[in-house]
Amino acid sequence: MTDIEIARNTKLEKIVDVAKKIGLDEEDLELYGKYKAKISDSVYKKIENKKEGKLILVTAISPTPLGEGKTTISIAIADGLRKIGENSILALREPSLGPVFGIKGGAAGGGKVQVAPMEDINLHFTGDIHAMTAANNLLSSMIDNHIYFGNELGFEKVVWKRCMDLNDRQLRVVETGLSGEKKIVPRMDKFDITVASEIMAIVCLSKDLKDLKEKLGNIIVGYNKKEKPIFAKDLKANGAMAVLLKDAIKPNLVQTLEHTPAIIHGGPFANIAHGCNSIVATKMAMKLGDYVITEAGFGADLGAEKFLDIKCRKAGLKPDAVVLVATIKALKYHGGVEKEEIQEENLEGLKKGMDNLYRHIDNLKNKFGLNVIVAINKYTKDTEKEIKFLEEELNKNNIQVSVVEGWAKGGEGATDIAKKITTLVNEKEDFKFIYEDNETIKEKILKVANKIYGAEDVEYSQEAEENIKKIENLGYGNLPVCIAKTQYSFSDDAKNLRCDNKYNIHVRDVEIKGGAGFVVVLAGKIMTMPGLPKVPAAESIDIDENGNIIGIF
């Protein structure tokens, strides 16, 4: 059966009954039908004195184009913990329509470990991302309207971009205002995908509605002739934007196929954004469960680094353990095995690919000082010989490992890792950031490049040099850095899988996100508006005469 058929054939519990497992009543919920709900603001007071549970971060080795199953493993672990009698809860990101209709076709887990209702979660869900798109584009329209009616604030340069939550490379650079109407000033504009927008980051990093409104006001939308920043609050736009986002900032409650509570909220990409779910969702989950399973996007060099250096820094969080997901196919891929041969048994390629795994382990254990366990996400074509080889190699190096069969067996296939996690979270850690707030922007970038990516040095374009100087002169040099680069390599070259030789990171531009409170560093050829693949998943997605959705997996 396909994922969607497995999900459709599973009887879900009503969301009010799921909520009771974590101490919430019906009055604590704002219902979106029988199986989805927003968690009301009133819950914060109800849980403020509760003890926080253990936080488990799920990350991965450098992925292949189809991903390595972080969400699948996250769900399996949460279900596995419930199987052994623990009060677990998930805190995950919302899927973007970009990859759903692009290459992935869905991002709600797979097989017997899914969050549900999976069609809703993968598509419009509770409308959070639509609200963010609307708030973003409301600000754009208010900027251009202000310029149309006389430009009192003296816009010389507009830096705010429009957005939409679909992959559309044609919108990366556009020219707007071509109607020829009097007073309309044509200008070059750009689109980001919504999940890479500053609005998404702000929602995910805000503590509450008041904080959200303040952060929205601090968005830099442009500069005047004296190169002084113009803010969203100067346009009096942040109030209306907050109105559009008043429900989007509330976490969403759903369930796994085994009825484990799951809070799904916020969905920034990790290659072009900060890659973590919302602070409010994570903190709420830690008050509601004894074990909180959360994930950060793409490989640990991207998602985990940003989770630790940005989210943990801003929210005062620290994971009690890290699960590093690896697959046999990805290890062989990074070991140089050709794509068409990746399903065949190849111990030599597997061994070579373990260099990638060891680098991620070293970063997490020795650079960040965290406890790590490797989760082998087992696929049906993995051979016992390959799995045994991988386990033996990791055991030789005193690295904890567990084979997870959640896709085929559900929570039962993750009880081994669940038991190991309950022990691992009590071991001593020495958590530390990669850089400090008071370091310069270049020092921060270099430390991430050296320590996490393994690069020799960082090279900057003239535009990046000028923008760094400008950002620091404006007083934003103390902010963390969010490096946007390819997810397929430790380097900024997607084809350099092995990273055997010396390499530098190439920074082409640097942007200030004054509302979100970080500096975006664009490295290599990474784009903040992705494109569709040659054969997009959208071609296979359909709806039958009975209203059943087909093709989401």
Image (tube, grey):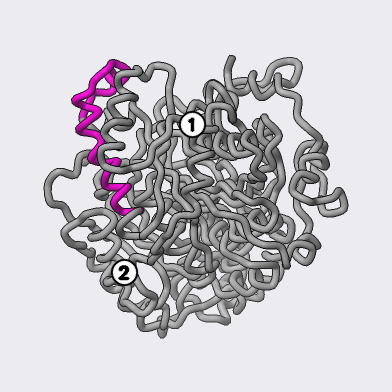
From this view, report whether residue 459 is shown above or below residue 413. Answer: below
Which residue does the image show at 64% across and 43% down from the upper left? 86
Q: Secondary structure at mark 1?
A: loop
Q: Circle 2 is placed at which residue position?
A: 444
The amino acid type of the residue labelled 1 equals Lys
- Is 432 placed left or right of 18 in the picture? left
CA separation, marks 2 and 1?
33 Å
How packed is label 1: few (under 14 Cα within 10 Å), some, or many (20 or more)? some
Magenta stretch contains residue 359: yes
Q: Hey, which quadrant is residue 248 in on the image?
A: bottom right
Q: Circle 1 is placed at which residue position?
A: 104
Is there any visible trace of residue 28 in the rendered image?
yes
From this view, report whether residue 235 is shown above or below residue 302. Answer: below
Q: Main secondary structure of the magenta part?
A: helix
From this view, report whether residue 324 is shown above or below residue 182. Answer: above
Which residue does the image show at 16% across and 59% down from the upper left? 456
- Quarter of the figure that contains the C terminus: top right
What is the span of residues highlighted in magenta in the rendered image? 336-364
The amino acid type of the residue labelled 2 equals Lys
Q: Secondary structure at mark 2?
A: helix
- Quarter of the figure that contains the N terminus: top right
Which residue does the image show at 55% across and 54% down from the upper left? 55
